[in-house]
């Protein structure tokens, strides 16, 4: 596979991550550090889940056992996201108290940047996991089609588009979870809705890669889910109360 053939899917899958990193996170060394911390946290979580579920993997990604494993992995990541939201609430409260002592205050834009850094870290970790899992296929010519032979679309292009969708869904899920934590929201808003978005993205990815009847609509649905998630999360955040009570 040529360098251009690798670079194309890579830029498709990591486009939002690179854009956010260069336009938003690069303006602050703190946000860059938080993004790296978030990526390290989620890489650790993904490795731990992989080790935990390794003995239960199936050779058929579309059967019930594999879908059950997928559900388990999403639930475990949801628990890790909830823990991250709790830590975000605690850390932001400390920062706000420090800022008040300096006769200043945190703004919603500050909180937005912190959440975006953490969410982008998770998206980067997930994209890294995707691309690492594709390495065995790089020995082929780069036109390998999925098992479903989805309109002869390259496996790498389809997988990159799925990664693009995840790069939208995961930061949106982090934004929803952290916003609910700021408002002392219940478990449904803090963990349930973000996990539901994550689960929908995961199922669309699996079904779109294994079922010829779904793959034609699966990838566009994945991208639409990503855009809808970003819209929902952004609206939820900017309607939230200010940070003065933290």
Image (tube, helix red, strand yellow):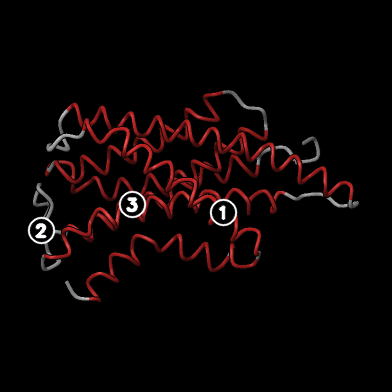
Considering the numbered disc 2 on the image, is that residue within a helix, a strand or a loop? loop
The quadrant where residue 62 appears:
top left
Nearer the observer: mark 2 or 1; the answer is 1
Instruction: Kindly report the distance in space between the C-alpha atoms of the residues bearing marks 2 and 1.
Output: 37 Å
Q: Is residue 241 left or right of residue 141?
A: right
Residue holding disc 2:
152
The dot on residue 26 is none
Instruction: Kindly report the distance in space between the C-alpha atoms of the residues bearing marks 1 and 3.
Output: 18 Å
Instruction: Kindly report the distance in space between the C-alpha atoms of the residues bearing marks 3 and 2.
Output: 24 Å
Residue 52 at x, y = what percent? 32, 33
Name the foreground residue: 122 vs 55.
55
Classify 27 as above or below 191.
below
Name the foreground residue: 14 vs 219.
14
Name the foreground residue: 97 vs 233.
97
Looking at the image, which residue is at 46% across and 60% down?
A: 17
Residue holding disc 3:
129
Considering the numbered disc 1 on the image, is that residue within a helix, a strand or a loop? helix
Looking at the image, which residue is at 32% across and 65% down?
A: 10
Q: Is residue 193 left or right of residue 10?
A: right
Nearer the observer: mark 1 or 3; the answer is 3
The quadrant where residue 6 appears:
bottom left
Q: Quadrant of the N terminus?
A: bottom left
Residue holding disc 1:
117
């Amino acid at each position: 596979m040529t360098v251009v053939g690798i670079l194309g899917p890579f830029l498709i899958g990591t486009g939002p991550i690179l854009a956010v990193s260069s336009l938003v996170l690069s303006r602050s060394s703190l946000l860059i550090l938080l993004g790296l911390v978030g990526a390290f946290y989620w890489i650790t979580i993904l490795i731990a889940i992989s080790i935990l579920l390794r003995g239960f993997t199936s050779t058929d990604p579309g059967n019930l056992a594999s879908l059950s494993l997928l559900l388990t992995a999403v639930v475990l990541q949801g628990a890790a996201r909830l823990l991250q939201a709790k830590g975000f609430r605690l850390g932001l409260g400390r920062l706000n108290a420090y800022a008040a002592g300096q006769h200043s205050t945190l703004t919603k834009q500050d909180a937005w940047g912190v959440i975006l850094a953490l969410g982008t870290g998770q998206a980067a970790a997930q994209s890294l996991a995707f691309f690492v899992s594709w390495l065995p296929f790089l020995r082929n010519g780069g036109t390998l089609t999925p098992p479903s032979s989805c309109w002869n679309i390259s496996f790498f292009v389809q997988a990159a588009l799925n990664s693009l969708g995840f790069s939208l869904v995961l930061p949106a899920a982090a934004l929803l979870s952290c916003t609910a934590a700021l408002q002392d929201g219940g478990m449904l808003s803090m963990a349930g809705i973000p996990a539901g978005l994550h689960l929908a993205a995961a199922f669309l990815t699996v079904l779109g890669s294994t079922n010829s009847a779904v793959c034609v609509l699966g990838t566009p649905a994945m991208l639409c889910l990503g855009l809808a998630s970003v819209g929902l999360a952004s609206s939820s955040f900017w309607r939230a109360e200010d940070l003065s009570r933290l």
